[in-house]
Image: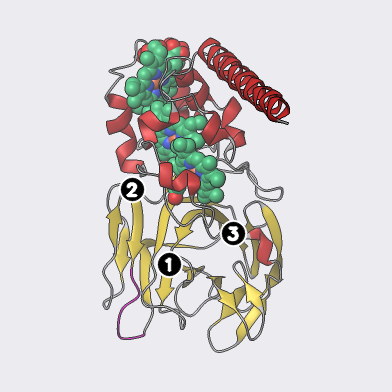
Amino acid sequence: MHSKARTGLSIVCGMFIFVFFAGALAAFLIGQSQARAGSGSESGGNSKCYVCHPSLKTEDISTIHLAEDVTCDKCHGPSIEHMHDEMLMTKPDVLLGRSEVEQLCGKCHTNHENPEKVKEFEEKWAGRIRPNGRAVTSDSVCTDCHGTHNIDKSTTLPAGQSQEGEWVAAFNGRDITGWKPSDNSSWTVKRGQITAAPPADGKGADLWTEAEYEDYQLAVTFRADWPVHAGIWVRGRGGPRVEIFDSKTPEAFTGSISLPGRGLVLVNLREDLFDPEGYNTISIKVRGDRIQVWLNAEEIGAVRTISPLKGQIGIHVSKHPDSEANEIFVREVLIQKLDKPK
Ligand code: HEC
Ligand code: HEC
Ligand code: HEC
Ligand code: HEC
């Protein structure tokens, strides 16, 4: 009996020792393969971030820098809480707005070796949207030209939106030059994004382009401190507005179009097209009385509706019934004027 227990014990001990060594071996091998992938040994490479950001495995900014031991955490901080937050409510430690990009990259990089090559590239792409969804303009930052790191979902132009003319960045990433706030509101630029809280008086706040537009295409990329009630005016305050909201009665989601005094004239019933945690792009094509809308490159639909023939483009935010004062953050506004239909 006694000796039987001893044998049992030594088997258990043996198993422990075996498991311990197997574990150590596995850890060693994993360490080796990560070291071979050129990643930081102490930071463990990028694999912990790739779990949820798999599209960055093949992206330039991530891969070039991984090989140099500049891993995600060197630019975004260790972001431990972000990684372990199953509700995905905690943001990474370091978020980089548009205006902060050059400062960050400038820590390790100085001027281009071949400025004439960069100039050539700039001329080739001037005013056009690159495959990474960004337009090259005189205000371009590093990530407009390098990589697709800025947005980790597909940002190619939706089918139906086309490269007919020149895309112009209506927001310079630094301040609201070219825009005019409505009297009751104060809009600011924080971390490279235009933002405003809805005014306490319950009325909506608007930020208008100084210029008026007739026929055009528009792409607005934004994030929202959900829930919000916001929107994009298409041709001035009396005209149609593309909504950024969750409406219960009637049921309608972001990308629907409303007309003041008439209610909804186009309804988006697909709640899944909107990402409440990340950036979203609303694309709009306005031609005559026809308005066509896409959300994250998926077409929502088109309507012919009463509309002034020209007007300012406006960003709108009003108080959401279920929350205090939630903000939206607009990172990019690209506009392309269209010729009159023949
Ligand atoms: C458990 C899943 C998960 C892990 C692990 C994870 N993320 Fe995220 N992360 C998300 C989600 C979901 C979002 C929001 C959607 C989006 O923007 O893609 C996000 C957004 C981000 C953003 C953009 C936030 C913003 O508001 O602009 C950054 C930057 C980021 N993650 C960095 C990292 C880094 C660095 C790591 C590794 C240290 C990491 N993430 C690991 C799920 C994760
Ligand atoms: C060399 C610095 C650098 C490294 C390395 C880096 N990032 Fe970023 N990241 C940035 C910058 C700068 C931005 C903002 C780019 C912009 O908006 O133009 C950004 C933006 C993001 C975003 C926001 C994308 C969105 O939806 O707008 C996510 C998510 C992200 N990074 C995740 C990661 C992950 C995961 C890794 C590692 C695989 C990583 N980053 C490595 C600098 C870096
Ligand atoms: C912590 C330092 C560090 C930061 C921050 C950093 N880089 Fe780098 N980057 C490097 C190193 C090191 C290399 C490899 C050596 C080289 O080519 O300069 C590199 C290489 C590159 C290359 C490839 C160069 C080539 O020869 O093909 C590009 C492009 C680049 N970085 C762009 C960026 C951009 C854009 C940012 C900002 C989002 C950035 N880097 C931020 C360290 C950094
Ligand atoms: C207008 C587009 C554009 C912008 C903006 C831009 N780059 Fe470049 N970059 C290029 C092109 C094109 C090349 C390749 C040039 C060549 O063939 O020598 C390049 C090359 C590089 C290289 C490779 C080595 C070198 O010095 O030529 C690095 C590193 C780099 N860029 C970093 C950056 C950083 C950091 C920023 C922001 C401060 C930035 N770039 C902004 C277009 C751009």
Do residues under tags 2 and 3 come within 8 Å of each other at their CB atoms? Answer: no
Q: Quadrant of the N terminus?
A: top right
Indicate which disc, 3 or 1, sits on the residue closer to the N terminus. Answer: 3
Label 1 SS = strand
Type of amino acid under label 1: Gly
Q: Quadrant of residue 57?
A: top right
Q: Is residue 109 visible?
A: yes
The residue identified by callout 2 is 192
Pointer 1: residues within 10 angstroms few (<14), some, or many (20+)? Answer: many
* Coordinates of residue 51 in the picture (x, y in percent): 59, 37
Pointer 2: residues within 10 angstroms few (<14), some, or many (20+)? Answer: many
Q: Is mark 2 within 8 Å of ligand 2?
A: yes
The residue identified by callout 3 is 284
The residue identified by callout 1 is 314
Magenta residues, start to end: 197-202
Label 2 SS = loop
* Coordinates of residue 259 in the picture (x, y in percent): 57, 81
- x 30%, y 65%: residue: 180
| Nearer-the-camera pick, 101 or 91 | 91
